[in-house]
Structures are given as C-alpha cells and as structure tokens.
Image (cartoon, helix red, strand yellow):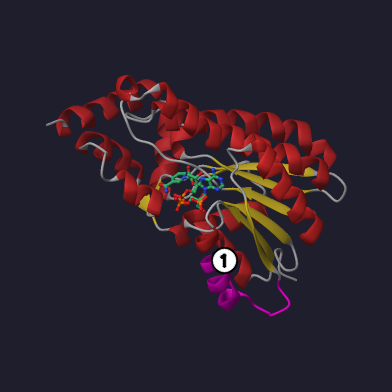
Amino acid sequence: MDFFANKTVYITGGSSGIGLAAAHALAQRGAHLVLLARDKKKLDSAAASLRSSARSSAQKIETFIADVADAPRAEKALAKAVRACGAPDILINSAGAGYFGAFTDTPPEIFQRIFKTNVFGTQGVNHVLVPVMKEKGGIIVNVSSLGGLIGMYGYSAYGGSKYAVVGMSEAMRAELAPQGIRVQVLCPPEVDTPMVREERASITPEALAVKLMAGQLTVDQVARVLLRGIERGSFIIIPGFLARSTWVLSRFFPRFSRKVSDLVLKMNRK
Ligand SMILES: NC(=O)c1ccc[n+]([C@@H]2O[C@H](COP(=O)([O-])OP(=O)(O)OC[C@H]3O[C@@H](n4cnc5c(N)ncnc54)[C@H](OP(=O)(O)O)[C@@H]3O)[C@@H](O)[C@H]2O)c1
C-alpha cells in the first residue's frame, strides 16, 4: 500500500509552484487533495490539471478560497473544508509571499505584509487545524526556506519571516509529537516558480550570485524530496545537494561561510 494512498492532504498555496507540484506528486500516489489559496481561477485550473494526474477517479480534489493573512476568513474557509473533506492526515503549509530588498529600503508595511502571510498565515492555519488533527494524528509540513536557516543578503524581511517559521516548527515538533502529530519543515534553496520569476525584476547581481551558490531546483525535484522526507519523517527537509552542503558549511563553519558569502558579494558588486 502506498504511504500516501487515500490520505487526505491539505495544501495551502496548492494552486502554484511548490504546492502545486507537491499536489501533482501526491495525486499520482493516490492521495485526496484539498487546495487553499486566494485566486479562484488559479485554484480551478490547478484542480483541473490535477484530475489528469490522479491515479483513480475516486480521489477527491477540492478547492477552497482562503487568504491565510486574513485569519478570521481563513478560519471560516478551513472549517468549511473540514466539514466537506474531513480532517487532514497531512497538512502542507506552502502559502507564502516573497520579497527581495535591502533592509534600509524596505518599508515597515512590507515587513508586516511578509510576516502576516509567512508567519501569522502559517501559525493561523496550524492554530485551526491542529485541534482537528489531534483525534487521528497526522503530519504537518511548514514550508520555510534555506533563507530560514542561513541569513542572506537582501532578505531581511523574507528571511526573517522564514527563520520564524523554522523556530515555530521546532517548538511545534516537540509539543505535538506526544499528541500523534509529526511536524516537519521544508527548506528549499531557489526554486523555479512564479514567485522567483517575479523576484528576478528586483534582485541585484551580487545577491543572485550568492543565492545561487546553494543551487536552483525545479518544482518537481522539490516535490520528490518533500514526499520522500515525509515518508522518512526527517524534521528538516532540504532539497538539493548544494543546498544541503551550504547549510552544513554555515552550521559547522559559520565564520568561514560568512567570509565566502562576503567575498562572492564583493566580486559580483558592480
Ligand atoms: N520559489 C522559491 O525559490 C522558494 C524557495 C524557498 C521557499 N519557498 C517557499 O515555498 C512556498 C511556495 O512558494 P512558490 O515559490 O511555490 O510560490 P508561488 O508559485 O508564487 O505560489 C505561492 C502559492 O501561495 C498562494 N498564496 C500566496 N499568498 C497567499 C495567501 N495570503 N493566502 C493563501 N494563499 C496564498 C498562491 O496563490 P494565490 O496567489 O492565489 O493566493 C500560490 O498558490 C512559499 O512559502 C515560499 O516562501 C519558495
């Protein structure tokens, strides 16, 4: 029996990028899917494409409009989803907002918007669904970033929010394990998605050079590693050899790792 067959998987941000690729991989493995995002058109087109990935017509693919940054409305949408589809066996919190910009050029409103989606959005969805998941147990994957493990040039708002997601996930892991809920955190390097394509308009050459030291992956590569990570149960899931090596280097040799990063920035500064 496939690990994911007949499991009900909720994916916030399931209509695009990493969330959508994970949904396709899960549909191929026989999972029922519940996608949540803001844009109905994107949700509809994701659901239509997922039907062709599904292993059987008995697999449910449902969508719900929800803005995770709007807690009261998101709570209503999640309650509706639970009434219609039951509690999640697996919850993937992939909804997120990106932003590139130097700290001094980043207005407070941007910090607030990024934290509202990435931190409070993830917290809010977990706040509603953890009590619902307690009865039968389950798995939660919070999507952070390699930028949530390593401080990166130009990502004070985004990286700060993703560090918060890692910290929150660490605490949730320890607290929820005795209650039958496993918490994991996905930390990918750069992944080719609409979010990153949009970022290309503002990112500077030196920031791009230092970021790409950790490699760039496709959404399908990330989805493959994510599903393997869920099956294995490892707390931190870092897709990509270069990304894992960058993390190990920064963890065990932080001074050296900062020196290399500063040097790459200097060499690529115009
Ligand atoms: N791409 C990368 O390089 C990269 C690297 C590391 C981590 N990540 C993280 O991976 C996750 C997915 O990013 P992605 O690159 O796949 O981006 P993406 O292709 O832009 O997808 C983002 C998804 O989140 C949804 N979303 C955004 N804001 C939302 C909100 N307030 N409420 C509900 N849904 C919302 C979007 O749909 P709507 O716009 O319709 O709401 C979309 O489905 C994010 O958490 C991101 O930070 C990405």
Q: Counting other residues with Cα less than 10 Å from the Cα at mark 1, is it few (<14), some (14-19), or many (20 or more)?
A: many
In the image, residue 84 sits, relative to residue 135, either above or below, namely below
Q: Is residue 157 left or right of residue 33?
A: left
Q: Horizontal and vertical percent for residue 62? A: 67, 64
Question: What quarter of the picture does the C terminus occupy?
Answer: top left
Q: Which residue is mark 1?
A: 25
Q: Residue at x 80, y 47 (%)?
A: 133
| Residue 105, horizontal then vertical, whole percent | 30, 23
Asked whether, in this view, residue 137 is left or right of residue 10, the answer is right
Tell me if residue 49 is in the magenta stretch.
yes
Can residue 183 be seen in the rendering of this structure?
no
Q: Provide the major secondary structure of the magenta segment.
A: helix
Q: Amino acid at mark 1?
A: Ala
In percent of width and height, residue 214 lies at 36, 42
Whether residue 245 is in magenta: the answer is: no
Q: Residue 117 lies in what quarter of the image?
A: top right
User: Residue at position x 66%, y 44% from top?
Assistant: 74
Percent across and percent down for residue 182 are 73, 43
Residue 90 horizontal side relative to residue 157, left or right:
right
Q: Is residue 93 visible?
A: yes
Q: Which residues are magenta?
A: 44-59
What residue is at 49 percent from the left and 57 percent from the top? Answer: 16
Question: Which of the image's four quarters has the N terminus?
Answer: bottom right
Q: Is mark 1 within 8 Å of ligand 1?
A: no
Residue 64, image quadrant: bottom right
Q: 233 above or below 165?
A: below
On screen, 170 above or below 228?
above
Tally of numbered discs:
1
* Mark 1 residue element: helix
